[in-house]
Image (cartoon, grey):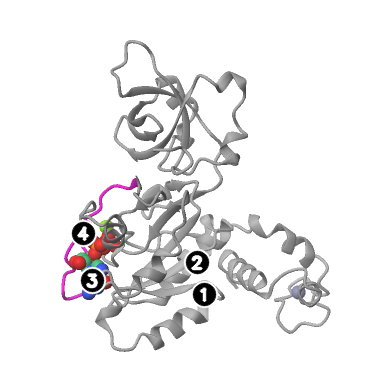
Amino acid sequence: MSAKNLGWDDFFESQLNTSDLGFIRARVSRQNTDSLMLLSEIGELTGVLPGKFKEHNKENLPTIGDWILATKPEHFETDKVLVQKILARKNILARTEIGQGKRRQLMAANVDRVFIVAGLDKEFNPRKIERYLLLCWSLALEPVIVLNKVDLIKNPESAIKKVRAIAGDTPILCLSTLTGMGEESFLSHLTEGSTNIFLGSSGVGKSSISNMILGRQSFVTGPVRDKDSKGRHTTSYRELVLTEQDFVIIDTPGMRGLEIWKENVSLEAFQDILDLAENCKFSDCAHLTEPECALKKAKENGLISSERINQFRILSQAKNPL
Ligand SMILES: Nc1nc2c(ncn2[C@@H]2O[C@H](COP(=O)(O)OP(=O)(O)O)[C@@H](O)[C@H]2O)c(=O)[nH]1
Ligand SMILES: [Mg+2]
Ligand SMILES: [Zn+2]
């Protein structure tokens, strides 16, 4: 297992200083109740969090995908290490739990590519895809939409058209983990050293996709109850796996609701557009047909793409519904 294949790159390397040289670097692959499973150049490790660490980082404990630095106290068993710090994250995928308290739950850190998975069966609903698109665009991540179970319908064109209407230029792929249709084009989006996560409702085929990539039944998949196409919650924990093709995949349990709330939508990645929009003639400019719209002008001058303006408009609307 090389650190590079596990996703280590200059972003993390540049955070190390000379005092960190003796540390073991490892990536969180799974969270247990009181320990972490870690992947590293020296193999699989179990990470223990010191009590002090937990106290100081209550809101910010290591999550799947985090890179951590650890030490190996002499009295520890061979595969056990003590977590010392979390390296700064490239990004963090979070959702807000439905129910009391609306607790923020971290899904994964340091993700390069999000695959938004939907099933082309009875449950197909483009609105769900839209929420995930918002989340990705908020984090300046370029998603790929996977319409799975294409074997179940004769003609996917109308579904593709519906998705295209909300997805801008986002790639849309049709796939069947059952027949292998679309597999090659899907696999071409997974590149060496990248970290890939599959998001989507329960039962759409996320674990089946992971198994297709791994070429074995590593993840438990569940039969869909016939009546409403809903999968049982067969994946109950998240897990990060290094594949033989040298990229990382993360399987997630299904999400019941659309647990991405306004709180998770941010315009941070669109500061340049926010700055430009200050110069629109109307303060409530929708950047569509208004005269003297600064974004329209910037687009004509090739400063920003219509794609990003589109993402910006959808995100601002989700954040501040009219
Ligand atoms: N017809 C069909 N069924 C599929 C396909 N992919 C997955 N399934 C089935 O859908 C159900 C849910 O799959 P699973 O991978 O557990 O979904 P997850 O909850 O998103 O991880 C299982 O019974 C799978 O066999 C596909 O391409 N076509
Ligand atoms: Mg699953
Ligand atoms: Zn404008």
Whether pointer 1 and pointer 3 mark residues with C-beta atoms closer than 8 Å, the reply is no
Span shown in magenta: 221-240
The residue that label 2 is drawn on is 133
The answer as to whether callout 4 falls within 8 Å of ligand 1 is yes
Magenta stretch secondary structure, dominant: loop
Query: Would you say residue 229 is visible in this rendering?
Result: no
Q: Are marks 1 and 4 in contact (CB under 8 Å)?
A: no
Task: Report the residue marked by disc 1.
Answer: 167
Rendering coords of residue 231 (x, y %): 22, 65
Name the N-terminal-most of marks 2 and 3. 2
- Three-letter residue code for mark 2: Leu
Question: Residue 143's spot in the image, x, y percent?
Answer: 50, 64
- Does the magenta-highlighted stretch encompass residue 145? no
Q: Residue at x 32, y 11 (%)?
A: 75
Using the rendered view, name the quadrant where residue 303 is placed.
Answer: bottom right
Secondary structure under badge 2?
helix
Circle nearer the N terminus (3, 4): 3
Indicate whether residue 235 is drawn in magenta.
yes
Ligand 1 within 8 angstroms of badge 1 C-beta: no
**Quarter of the image containing the C terminus?**
bottom right
